[in-house]
Amino acid sequence: MVFTGRMNLRRIAFAGLAVLGLAGALFAVRRPLTMAAPRCLTGHWHGCYDTENGVVLMTLVGLPVAVLVAWALIFFRRDTGGAALVGLVYGTVPWLWLTLMPGPGAGVVPGRVSLIPLRDLVSMGAFGIGGNLLVFAALGFFGPIRFAALASLPRILVLGAGCSILIETAQYVFQLDRVSSVDDVLVNAVGAMLAGLASRRWWRTADHRVQACAY
């Protein structure tokens, strides 16, 4: 009983810290988000979905719906895999949209490539590195819960790197006025692996479910 109480206390503390962290992040970016709000809430594409602030704002607006759908799948259907798939898709698509968003010189400026590892990390800054870590974080976190075949840190790392290479290639081929950097691939892959490490305690549930279905 004492051990269970400690575990519950840790979960409550972790959830509280997560809520405080999210609240702090929202407070820090409240001004840019409120700038995009008028265009987004009136249904305009330009000034909303073609801006980073607009995409982030609409992602936050739709977050309660995604959480509700995931909760309904778990509570009514006991479908943890389906809930994980909701988290995977909702947590990845906005980042893909942001990374493939054309720059001001799209279609005019030739594609640029940076193939020297670690050279671009300094220019990224803390905000850029944090953003790149989150691009495939949902894939790394929820992927092994939904798909037992991904329940391996090396596989998550390779998957994150492969998806990132596809994005960097698309940025170059379609001349989106972005730099296709090997450092983006490295940070994206590490972010996916770290997220997978955070969800590792739930991987076995997915493995057991697959084995049970086999019987």
Image: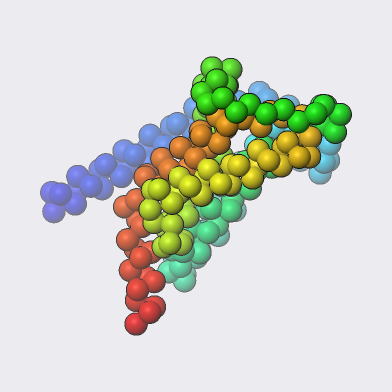
- 99 shown above or below 139: above
Viewer-nearest residue: 133 or 183: 183
Q: Residue at x 60, y 28 (%)?
A: 115
> In this orientation, does residue 61 appear?
no
Q: Residue at x 82, y 31 (%)?
A: 106
Quarter of the picture containing the C terminus is bottom left
Q: Residue at x 15, y 49 (%)?
A: 3
Residue 122: image location, x then y, percent: 54, 17
Viewer-nearest residue: 110 or 123: 110
Residue with the most extreme left position: 2
Residue 114: image location, x then y, percent: 63, 26
Which quadrant of the view contains residue 28? top right
> In this orientation, does residue 178 appear?
yes
Which quadrant of the view contains residue 207? bottom left
Q: Residue at x 43, y 51 (%)?
A: 155
Residue with the most extreme front position: 116
- 103 shown above or below 145: above
Viewer-nearest residue: 114 or 103: 114
Residue with the most extreme top position: 122
- 46 shown above or below 81: above
